[in-house]
Structures are given as structure tokens and as C-alpha cells.
Image: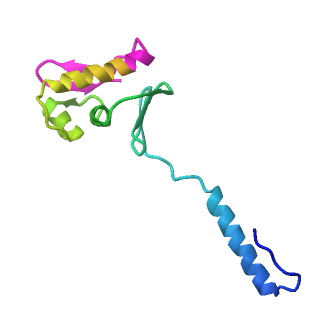
Amino acid sequence: NDYLKKDTPREMLLVRIDTLMKRTRAMQQLPEDDEIMQRGLCTINLDRYTVSWNNEKIDISITEFWILKALAKHPGQVKSRQQLMDAAKITVEPETINTYIGRIRNHIKAVDPDASPITAEYSMGYRWSS
């Protein structure tokens, strides 16, 4: 990259070497670790907005991602439809949450037919139980 004449002063040579070393180190640095939420076989990458089940990527919408994150954040805790709408930052009819939950379940079942991490609690809401 850098061409130096034979009679380049030593100090200049050391500065150039230092600069090249810094540049090389910067290029070799790995990106910072992503924030990951692991719940059983489910891996939620909070920085990349991706979800995988048993190391298989699941393609979900951003709304489904926010709902899944809200449920998985506090396993065992029941979340009402309103709480899930707030977490997903959407304003819809409460019954629409049922549709989103069904889609999330279908995405997971497509990779693992025996999985059922989301349970419905009659007249209360949904719970992450995996």
C-alpha cells in the first residue's frame, strides 16, 4: 500500500508501520456481540431482529418479532392482548393478536412439529412456556 523511498527517515517509517498496524487491527476486529435472548430451543437476536428455532432460521414479520420477544422476555408470565399490542407498537383490534400468535405458532411448527412454546390462558392472554 505505502511506498517508501530507501532514504526515508526512521521516525517516518515507524509512524507508517504504526498506522498500518492500526488499520490491520481495525479490519480484523469482529463486530460487537449481538444481544441474544435464548429460551429453550428459541434464539432471538435482538439486534438483528432474527429468530431461530433449534438453529433453524424462522422468517417472521417485525410485528410477530415484537410479540414473540414480549412473550419470551418473561417466560411463564401471562401477557394480555393489550400488553402484546403495546409491545408490538401496533393499534389493532385485540382479536388480531390471535392471528399473530397463530402465525408465530405456525412458523415454529414448520421447523419443529412437536413444539408448542406459546400457550393460551383462557380470557387472560398468552404465556411463553418453553
Q: Which quadrant of the figure has residue 44?
A: top left
Across and down, in percent, residue 65 comes to 32, 34
User: Split into 4 quadrants, where in the image is the C terminus?
Assistant: top left
Q: Is residue 70 left or right of residue 111?
A: left
Closer to us: 72 or 46 = 46
Image x and y of residue 110, in percent:
41, 16
Q: Furthest residue to the top?
A: 114
Q: Quadrant of residue 102?
A: top left
The count of marks equals 0
Residue 118 visible in the current orientation: no
Q: Is residue 33 left or right of residue 6?
A: left
Please identify the quadrant where the N terminus is shown: bottom right
Q: Is residue 48 left or right of residue 100?
A: right
Identify which residue, 80 or 93, lies in the foreground: 93
Where 76 sits versus 47, above or below? above
Residue 111 location (% of width, % of height): 45, 18
Residue at the image point whose x is 48% and y is 24% from the top:
54
The quarter holding residue 63 reads: top left
* Percent of width and height locating residue 64: 29, 31
Q: Nearer the viewer, residue 20 or 78?
A: 20
Residue 123 is covered by the magenta coloring: yes
What span is in magenta? 108-130
Left or right: 92, with 55 as reference point: left
